[in-house]
Amino acid sequence: MSNVQQLRSGLWQIDTHFLGLPGIIASYLLAGNGEVALVDTGPSTTIEALLAGVHAAGFALTDVTHLLLTHIHLDHAGASGSLTQRLPNATVYVHEIGAPHLMDPTKLIASAERIYGAEMERLWGTIEPVPAERIKTMRDNDVLAVAGRRLNIVYAPGHATHQVAFHDPATAEIFCGDAAGVRLQGVDYVRPPTPPPELNLEDWSATIDRLLALNPRVLYLAHFGPTTDAPRHFTALRQRLYAWGELVLAAMRAGKDEEGIREELINRSLPELQQVTSNPDDLRRYEIATNYRMTVQGYMRYYRKVHPELLDQKQAQ
């Protein structure tokens, strides 16, 4: 069974089959005017599935001209360095904040190791640097002429300071990265991915406002697939983003440790998810896409770093 789905003319979705499972990490292939672009690369552990998808869509590896990264987290960009060795004509496009960490991924790897520990190799594989001469940086309001499209670059912090979304005003489509959260295909549930160290609720809420103001017809999620009801989707994302934050904040004020907060979040959120799917595979795939431990760590760091005053119960009263 092919891992590629043509969504419309010049646009394919490639399922990278992360950890051998479908519907967790997507890359999008854009083609036109003699160019081929991949929006996000996935991790190094899924390179062969990604490249098989390029072939299945009808293209050679030498046809790929652009790697468009929404941000540099390993599930979105971990394969970038390795792919520059396999895709000789591809240039990597990344926000200017993220570019240094692609050229020298030492800090990026160290940050991920604090979250994933001994699971790093199994999840993400080898993280190779991207040669400086293969990188072009982006910033807010830049416009890229790529694969027959003109893509507006929308700076989209909140999940990460180095995140952008790619907006095609001609088709009212947005390739969101993680700015639109996690919603797996066939499951009506939006889950906020909130890893450390850069979660910022205020920035993310402003990003949601900005993306909604573009009146998108389709959102293309990395986790996973297209959704056509942007107002409802973003409303659910913002509500859960803040509701989970309030739960974590209250638990921190009560003196609970990370494990206690994680258990409390699971007890609160798992029944919500089980109301919309009873399939154990769906529950597993949501946890792989954005796990509870990472979620709690992101909120805890956010409150300690951005709003330490909220942790003082007396001031909060």
Image (cartoon, grey):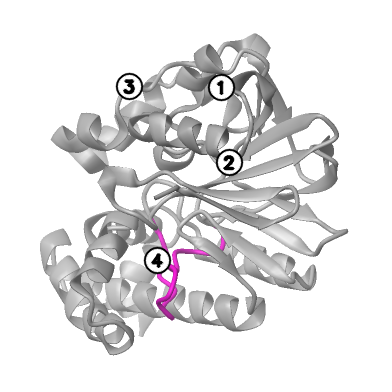
Viewer-nearest of labels 4 and 2?
2
The magenta stretch spans residue 189: yes
Q: Which residue is mark 4?
A: 309
Q: Which residue is mark 2?
A: 162
Q: Which residue is mark 3?
A: 126
The magenta stretch spans residue 6: no
Q: Position of residue 174 (x, y in %)?
A: 70, 59
Sooner in the amino-acid sequence: mark 4 or mark 2: 2
Q: Residue at x 38, y 20 (%)?
A: 106
Quick check: 216 above or below 52?
A: below
Sooner in the amino-acid sequence: mark 2 or mark 1: 1
Instruction: Indicate the amino acid at tag 3.
Output: Thr
The one of 218 and 263 positioned closer to us in this rendering: 218
Q: Which residue is mark 1?
A: 100
Sooner in the amino-acid sequence: mark 3 or mark 2: 3
Quarter of the image for residue 206 reads bottom right
Quarter of the image for residue 59 reads top right
Mark 1 secondary-structure assignment = helix
Instruction: Indicate the amino acid at tag 1.
Output: Pro
Sooner in the amino-acid sequence: mark 4 or mark 3: 3
Q: Answer left or right for 266 relative to 220.
A: left
Instruction: Indicate the amino acid at tag 2.
Output: His
